[in-house]
Amino acid sequence: FHFNKTEHALEVVDEFELTATSSLESAVITRQAIKVQGNRVVISSDGVSIVLVPGEGTELGQIEQLSYQDHLGDESRVSRISFQPKNLVSRSRISYRVISR
């Protein structure tokens, strides 16, 4: 994780090395409203938005709407936003930036 105060941005990087070529992903889960804008995802709540932007060599993967039981036992919905390497390789990194709007 790298937080850049002047740009109001957080960079998240997952680096990996596998013994065989395989798919891999990193995910963000949110209960807030989301909007996909090209290869970016905007998460908004109470008039504040952040933008998730795939880093170099990374692409936006699947976006799933999932249900689960929250800590009170109530049914709740979340969005699962995944990022993946653009190419299947045995050594790579997945990265994305979280930018405040």
Image: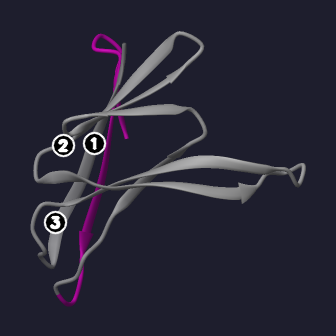
Q: Amino acid at mark 2?
A: Gly
Disc number at residue 55? Answer: 2
**Which comes before the other along the chain, label 1 or label 2?**
2
Mark 3 and mark 1: Cα distance apart in space: 14 Å
Tell me the residue that label 3 is attached to: 92
What x and y, as percent, mark residue 87? 9, 68
Q: Secondary structure at mark 2?
A: loop
The quadrant of the image that shows the N terminus is top left
The segment highlighted magenta reads: 1-20
Mark 2 and mark 3: Cα distance apart in space: 12 Å
The quadrant of the image that shows the C terminus is top left
For label 2, the crowd category at 10 Å Cα-Cα, with few meaning under 14, some 14 to 19 and many 20 or more, is: some
Q: Residue furthest bottom?
A: 20
Labels 3, 1: front one: 1
Q: Secondary structure at mark 1?
A: strand
Check residue 18 for magenta coloring. yes
Tell me the residue that label 1 is attached to: 96
In this rendering, is residue 7 above or below 56? Answer: above
* C-beta proximity under 8 Å, tags 1 and 2: yes
**Residue at (16%, 65%) from the top-left corner?**
92
Q: Secondary structure at mark 3?
A: strand
What x and y, as percent, mark residue 4? 31, 21
In this rendering, is residue 36 above or below 88? Answer: above
* C-beta proximity under 8 Å, tags 2 and 3: no
For label 3, the crowd category at 10 Å Cα-Cα, with few meaning under 14, some 14 to 19 and many 20 or more, is: some
